[in-house]
Image (cartoon, helix red, strand yellow):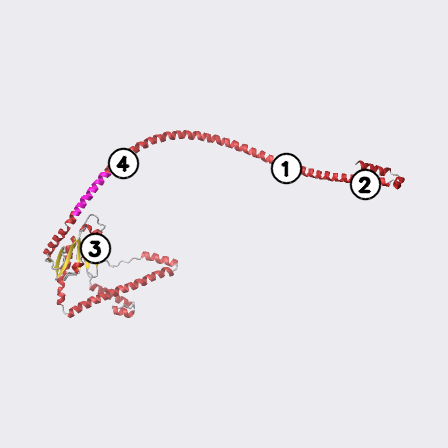
Amino acid sequence: MEKLTLFFSKIKEITLWQRLFGWGIVRSLSYDAFEEFRSLENNLRQKQEGYENLKNTYTKILTERENLGERVQDLEKAAIRKESQIEALSAKADELNASVSALSRKLSAYESVEEQKQHAYESKIRQIEQVKVDLDAERKRIADERLQEQENAFLRMKKQWQEHEAGVEQVMKNICQKHFITYVEKVPFKGNPDNTVEICGEYIVFDSKCPSNNDLVNFPKYIRSQTELVKKYVNQENVKKDIFLVIPSNTVDTISQLVYNLGDYNVFVITKDSLEPVLLALKKLEEYEFANQLSPDERDNICRVLGKFAHTTKRKIQIDQYFASQFINLLVKCKDDLPAEILEQVVEFEKAERLNPPTEKRAKQILTKDLADTHATLNAEAQIRKIEIPGSIEEFRLLE
C-alpha cells in the first residue's frame, strides 16, 4: 500500500523535466505499485471469497436457526401433548389403582368362597370315591354272577351237545316209528353213519355234528370240512346223493351257509327240530313212484305243460326286463331333455300319483276264470280304443 501511495504521489508531483529525464524511476515505482496492487487485488479477492463464505455460513446458520426454532416449537407442542397425556395417564392410573383395589377386595372374597368350595369339593370327592368303591364292589359281584351264569349256561350247552347225538338218534327213531319210515340200525354199506333211513330203496344219511368246545368261531369251518368227509357215504351203492348234517339248535346262528352243492352230491345242514318235516318231505318221494306207471302220452303231456310253463315264465321275465330297461331309459331322457320348469311340474305330479295294485289275501284263491274275464274286458276296451294287443306269446313275437 505504501508503494502505491508513493507512486501516485510521485505522479502528482512529477514535472516535465522529471518526465523527460526521470521516467525510469517512475517506471520502477509503477512496477512495484503494480505488484502491490496485484497483491492487494488477491487479498481483496480472498476477502470477498471469505465474505461470501461467511455470508453463506450466515445464511445456513439462519436457516438452521429457523429450523431449530420450528423444532423447538414442535418440541414445545409435543411437551404440551405429553403433559396432557401424562395427566390423562395419571388419571387412568388413579382409576386403575381404584380398580385394582376393588379387584383385590373381590379377589379376597372370591378366594374365601373358593376355599369353601374347595372344602365342599374335597368332601364330595371323598363321597364319590366311597361310592366308586361301592360301585366297583357291586360291579365285581355282578360280573362274578354273570360269569357264573355264563359258566352254568356253557355247562348246560356242553351237556346238551354231549347228549346231541343220542337225542338225534332217539328223535329219528320216534319219527320213523310214527310215520312208518324204515330206520336202518346197521347199514349194508361201508362206513358207520350216526343215523340212516331207507326211502324208495335209497339210504339217506343223517350225521350228528356238534362243537367240541365253547368256541363257536371255528364251528363253520368244522362243518365245511365235514361236508367233504361225508363223500365216503355218497360213493356207496344205493346211498342218496343228499346228505344231512344235524347240528344243535343253539349253534345254527353261527352257520351262514346251510346248503353245500359239491357237484356229485349235496349236503344240507339242519337242526334236530327240523328232522320231522325233512323226513316227511323225503317220504313224499314214495307217493311219486306212480310216475313209472304213467303211459308215454301222459308223460309227454306232463312234460309239455311243464315245458310251456317254463318257457312262458322265462318269456314273461324277458319281456318285463326289456320294458324295465326302456322305462329306465325314458326316465333318464325325461331328466336330461325336459326343461327345468316342466321337469319340476312333472316331479310334482309324480309325487301326487299313487298306484294301488290288488292286494293278495292268504285265504283267497286267484281264480283262472277271474283272470280270463279281466283279460277279455281289457281286450274289449283295447278294441274300442283301436289298440292292438297280442293274444299269445306267438302273436307278441310277430308284433316284435
Q: Amino acid at mark 3?
A: Ser
Q: In terms of secondary structure, where does tag 2 sit?
A: helix
Residue that mark 3 sits on: 225
Left or right: 109, with 376 as reference point: right
Instruction: Say which of 321 and 33 sits in front.
Output: 33
Tell me the number on the disc at residue 132.
Answer: 4
Q: Amino acid at mark 2?
A: Tyr
Residue 23 position in % (x across, y down): 86, 41
Q: In percent of the image, x 76 and y 39: which residue is there?
A: 39
Q: Amino acid at mark 1?
A: Glu
Residue that mark 2 sits on: 31
Instruction: Say which of 266 and 360 sits in front.
Output: 266
Q: In terms of secondary structure, where does tag 1 sit?
A: helix
Residue furthest to the right in view is 17
Q: Earlier in the sequence, mark 3 or mark 1?
A: 1
Q: Are marks 3 and 1 in contact (CB under 8 Å)?
A: no
* Residues at marks 3 and 1, CA–CA distance in whole angstroms: 111 Å
Residue that mark 1 sits on: 64
Magenta-drawn segment: 139-158
